[in-house]
Amino acid sequence: MSDLIKNVVVTLKKGEGRTIKAGGAWIYDNEIDTITGTFTNGDIVRVHDFDGYPMGAGFINQNSKIRVRMLTRKDGQAINEAFLRSRVQAAWDYRKTVMPAADLNCCRVIFGEADWLPGLTVDKYDDVLVVECLALGMEPLKVLLVDALKEILATDGYKIRGVYERSDAPVRKKEGLQPYKGFIGDEFDTNVEIVENGIHYMVDVVNGQKTGFFLDQKYNRLAMHRICKGKKVLDCFTHMGTFALNAGIAGASSVEGLDISEFAVAQATENARRSNLSDTVKFRAANVLDELPKLYEQGESYDVVILDPPAFTKSREATKNAIKGYREINMKGLKLVRDGGYLATCSCSHFMTQELFTEVIGQAAKAVHKRLRQVEFRTQACDHPILWAADESYYLKFYIFQVCEEK
């Protein structure tokens, strides 16, 4: 493969490009002054500052407000097969360095812009890879990158038996792409059993949410082990039962998991059976927002309440309503925590910043007359690295508090 960079130059307006100059990866349409040369959307082009200073190269796409996604900041860097393979190798080497070897069995191997492979996500579930491609420029390269990853993993003893693509997010349409699901290569059994933190899960990579499982909370779930031992625990928005099962394996006296989805409850129940936790950990289908007030009216209380809701906002415009949603759910959860008990609460929206989320939790505590002692603050697992100046890569905020009555 020869150098893929086209003889095209994107020149920024004076004073623009603040994001990439700070270390980020995106150039927006309103930051561009001129484009010289002929290109097709998805091509790799060079980027210059207003004064001609070379700033690197990236994918261009006039369908998207994110007009250029940067692949490299090095002037003169060729984008070819060797370059792309080096990116994949670097991503895997990073995981091998920052994660225990046992956790490499299930992890996010490539995390888009944070691994300098914009728009591409690859999750590893035992011997299966799940790929999500959300950028037009990455579309023709994804198979090459996946093949390189399979070879690199094989050299470390991880043989991959199948690859499935979950590029079915509606956001693909903003790139001029249609949502897509399907096999990359031969078909295979897409139900994959994984083990995380000692718990067995059956992951459905075709029908599960996102790529089949939420790997980003791995170490946050582990952090709850010491909190939940011997405790009565309520896990809200339990999905596949992940936090509930971690509480159970840690020695909780009883655990109840709630989710609105009957399918999720069935999955969680099966996961409890696989991990020999059925006697301690129970699940039932319920609308959490409606169920928490009912439990409070019934006089229920818990040593630990865990709130892991889906993102209440996926756009900046919806943030105001999301604030109300996060405030409401935290108020309802706090009411159910016994004096001296614990609340774990999180947000998975990058539009809900840490500062804003912290403020909302404080408002909720004040409204229900609770005092909070922060145990710790955490973010997403290290296989989901946060690239500074790339706000979209920092999305998960996770707090553990001790909850005290006002005295």
Image: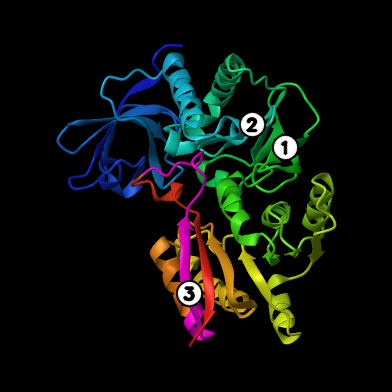
The answer to whether residue 322 is left or right of residue 265 is left
Residues at circles 2 and 1 in contact by the CB criterion of under 8 Å: yes
Q: Secondary structure at mark 2?
A: helix
Placement of 137 over or under 264, stated as above or below:
above
Is residue 377 part of the magenta span, yes or no? yes
Is residue 342 part of the magenta span, yes or no? no
Label 2 – label 3 distance at C-alpha: 37 Å
Q: Secondary structure at mark 3?
A: strand
**Frontmost residue, 14 versus 381:** 381
Q: Secondary structure at mark 1?
A: strand
The answer to whether residue 165 is left or right of residue 217 is right
- Residue 372 image label: 3
The answer to whether residue 40 is left or right of residue 296 is left
The mark tally for this picture is 3
Indicate the amino acid at tag 3: Leu
Q: Percent position (x, y) of residue 333?
A: 62, 74
**Frontmost residue, 69 versus 74:** 74
Placement of 328 over or under 309, stated as above or below:
below
Label 1 – label 3 distance at C-alpha: 36 Å
Work out whether residue 131 can be spotted.
no
Q: Percent position (x, y) of residue 244?
A: 71, 58
Placement of 47 over or under 255, stated as above or below:
above
Residue identified by numbered label 1: 194
Residue identified by numbered label 2: 105
Work out whether residue 356 can be spotted.
yes
Magenta residues, start to end: 364-387
